[in-house]
Image: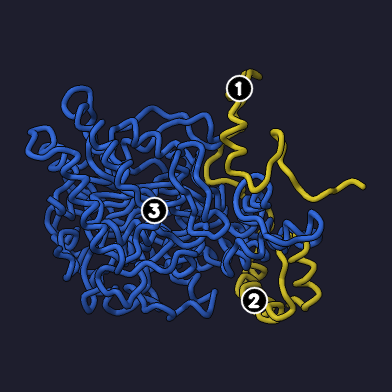
Chain colours: A blue, B yellow
């Protein structure tokens, strides 16, 4: 049951082979046994989970959806009414949300059962989960390695079969990179497709929520439930509802895959290169052709991101002032001292660094040289993609330069850590949909293949991923030692 | 250019984050590392390029000027560090 697809779980529930309460209990028991090792969940509430499973059981079949009764885990960045929503930070360690994020509301309405909230890098700033106030998440494939970040708890939870699926958010690779490092399928939609309402803001022009699951088929079901217009997010797009499963069975004959030469140069591990090349050979067998394309400005994506994202973060995180919610220092003098002490105590090192960088690049006299410059380069990066998509239907390459690294390997040098998102960040700057699917292993650690589609090309991209998953079994492999 | 300790304390003051003298040197070095890394942007010719603020070209939606929120003051203040009589308490700012 723990390895079943969402469709199989729905069928088992509909046939009354299992109840939602039984299914929820099965996953809660696994969490209880394995979470002390993995630290994937930071907040659990068995009574709440079982109560919503009981409600779901009355709706399965009659008036339910394709997801009713199926358990799910949320990244702890999504405000969830009545649940602590800490966003990986001491700042919000006691914050019980008074409302639901749009994504949470959507899954509640679909009848999914919330198992718990997943650990993450503090305020989604990190690529290894080492910046969480609640301690690092362990990679289920090798607990001496990082699970990736920032949605590392979500990734570890699904990889270890502590949840059938989870939500994540992706500002510079935070869904795709942990999906790659944990052997999952994870998708970041086109910017504006999923509402950001109630999703604690990091960099508003880049943040986008998406599903993390065991297959493209599962991601398609989840995205169909998550996506949709929401007037409470000013950048939510008014578009007709989509069935993201519609192209899953579409054959790949004639598909043109673009391979950016910049993604296949130096800097990629040999084992990652071999796995990606093997996946491309498989795609050619399925009838696709490959063509070299250029993304000449992609080398500028990481530096441009580390101006734009901190700038937006410094503005967004100014709301944490110790007045209306969140941490307030115990001892302080005047109002400014209260702000400065509360923020110094509530934020961890990486978050402070990014706020300081953002404050600097937006400060008087530096705005043009940094922020405006980075925004101009952002346009060059987006234009590169638009030009490349004239010659291909989908772009492919590695998700990450290497498989999961050891704890501490990059923690001391911020810039080295930033470079682990070298292949994913350009996609956020351009606002494109992207995903990562498992395509092999290196010394027992998963390797991810990245797919990038034109704006609003999610359905086709999911189909391209699904067809590969019909002829490969990387996504069905399981880490050892997870039996309970 | 690289930041001095004075620059760091000015930025920290703007950001309302207290930095102890013990942390200041390490913070300066890390910020300078990041700024040196983003410095490569300066070498790119961006003459005539429009800045891109957003991933998709949309204009701000307008809605009717009507009240859509309900009064949830109690729920919101229940999670505040300090309140009294429906007000948020902060240190005195006006003498």
Residues at discs 2 and 3 in contact (Cβ within 8 Å): no
Which residue is disc 2 drawn over?
A: B36
Q: Earlier in the sequence, mark 2 or mark 1?
A: 2
Q: Position of residue A151 (x, y in %)?
A: 40, 58
Residues at discs 2 and 1 in contact (Cβ within 8 Å): no
Q: Position of residue A362 (x, y in %)?
A: 72, 58
Q: Nearer the viewer, mark 2 or mark 3?
A: 3
| Chain of the residue under label 3 | A
Dot 2, how many residues are within 10 Å of its Cα: few (below 14), some (14-19), or many (20+)?
some
Q: Name the residue rendered at 41%, 63% in the picture.
A: A149
The answer, for residue A393, to whether it is visible in the render is no
Q: Nearer the viewer, mark 3 or mark 1?
A: 3
Whole-Å distance between the Cαs marked 2 and 1? 44 Å
Q: Is residue A481 left or right of residue A259?
A: left
Which residue is disc 3 drawn over?
A: A43
User: For residue B39, which numbered disc appears in the image?
Assistant: none
Q: On the image, which quarter does residue B71 sit in? A: top right
| Chain of the residue under label 2 | B
Which residue is disc 1 drawn over?
A: B63
Whole-Å distance between the Cαs marked 3 and 1? 37 Å
Q: Position of residue A130 (x, y in %)?
A: 45, 70
Query: Looking at this rendering, what residue extends furthest in the front direction?
Result: B85
* Secondary structure at numbered mark 2: helix
* Secondary structure at numbered mark 1: loop
The answer, for residue A483, to whether it is visible in the render is yes
Is circle 3 on the same chain as circle 1?
no
Q: Is residue A196 left or right of residue A260?
A: right
How many marks the image carries: the answer is 3
Quarter of the image where the N terminus of chain B is located = bottom right
Query: Looking at this rendering, what residue extends furthest in the right direction?
Result: B95
Q: Is residue B11 left or right of residue A247?
A: right
Whole-Å distance between the Cαs marked 2 and 3? 39 Å
């Amino acid at each position: 049951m723990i390895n079943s697809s969402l469709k199989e779980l729905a069928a088992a529930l509909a046939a009354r082979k299992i109840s939602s309460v039984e299914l929820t209990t099965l996953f809660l028991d696994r969490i209880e046994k394995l979470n002390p090792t993995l630290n994937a969940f930071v907040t659990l509430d068995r009574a709440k989970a079982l109560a919503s499973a009981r409600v779901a059981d009355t709706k399965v079949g009659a008036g339910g959806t394709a997801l009713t009764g199926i358990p799910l885990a949320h990244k702890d960045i999504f405000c969830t009414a009545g649940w602590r929503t800490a966003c990986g930070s001491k700042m919000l360690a006691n914050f019980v949300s008074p409302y639901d994020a749009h994504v949470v509301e959507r899954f509640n309405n679909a009848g999914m059962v919330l198992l718990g909230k997943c650990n993450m890098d503090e305020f989604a700033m990190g690529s290894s989960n080492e910046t969480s106030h609640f301690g690092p998440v362990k990679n289920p494939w090798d607990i001496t390695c990082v699970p990736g970040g920032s949605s590392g708890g979500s990734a570890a939870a699904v990889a270890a079969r502590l949840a059938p699926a989870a939500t994540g958010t992706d500002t510079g690779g935070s869904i795709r990179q942990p999906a790659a490092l944990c052997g999952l399928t994870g998708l970041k939609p086109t910017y504006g497709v999923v509402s950001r309402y109630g999703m604690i803001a990091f960099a508003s022009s880049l943040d986008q929520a998406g599903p993390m699951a065991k297959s493209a088929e599962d991601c398609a079901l989840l995205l169909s439930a998550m996506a949709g217009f929401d007037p409470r997010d000013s950048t939510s797009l008014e578009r007709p509802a989509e069935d993201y499963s519609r192209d899953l069975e579409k054959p790949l004959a004639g598909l043109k895959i673009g391979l950016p030469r910049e993604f296949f140069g130096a800097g990629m591990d040999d084992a990652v290169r071999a796995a990606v090349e093997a996946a491309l050979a498989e795609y050619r067998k399925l009838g696709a052709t490959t063509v070299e394309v250029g993304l000449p400005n992609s080398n500028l994506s990481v530096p441009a991101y580390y101006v734009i994202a901190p700038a937006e973060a410094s503005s967004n995180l100014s709301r944490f002032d110790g007045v209306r919610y969140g941490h307030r220092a115990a001892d302080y003098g005047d109002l400014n001292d209260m702000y400065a002490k509360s923020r110094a105590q509530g934020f961890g090192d990486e978050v402070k660094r990014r706020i300081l960088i953002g404050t600097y690049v937006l400060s008087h006299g530096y705005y043009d040289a940094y922020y405006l410059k980075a925004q101009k380069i952002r346009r060059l990066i987006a234009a590169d993609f638009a030009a490349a998509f004239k010659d291909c239907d989908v772009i492919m390459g590695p998700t990450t330069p290497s498989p999961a690294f050891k704890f501490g390997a990059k923690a001391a040098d911020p810039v080295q850590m930033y470079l682990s998102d070298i292949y994913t960040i350009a996609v956020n700057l351009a606002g494109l949909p992207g995903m990562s699917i498992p395509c092999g292993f290196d010394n027992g650690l998963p390797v991810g293949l990245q797919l990038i589609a034109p704006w609003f090309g999610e359905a086709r991209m999911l189909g391209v991923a699904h067809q590969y998953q019909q002829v490969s079994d990387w996504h069905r492999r399981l880490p050892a030692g997870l039996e309970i | 250019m690289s930041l001095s300790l004075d620059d760091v304390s000015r930025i920290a003051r703007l950001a309302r984050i207290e930095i102890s003298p013990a942390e200041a040197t390490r913070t300066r070095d890390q910020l300078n590392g990041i700024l040196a890394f983003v410095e490569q942007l300066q070498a790119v010719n961006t003459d005539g390029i429009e800045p891109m603020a957003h991933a998709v070209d949309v204009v701000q939606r307008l809605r009717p000027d009507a009240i859509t929120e309900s009064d949830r003051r109690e729920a919101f203040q229940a999670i505040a560090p300090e309140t009294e009589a429906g007000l948020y308490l902060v240190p005195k700012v006006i003498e």
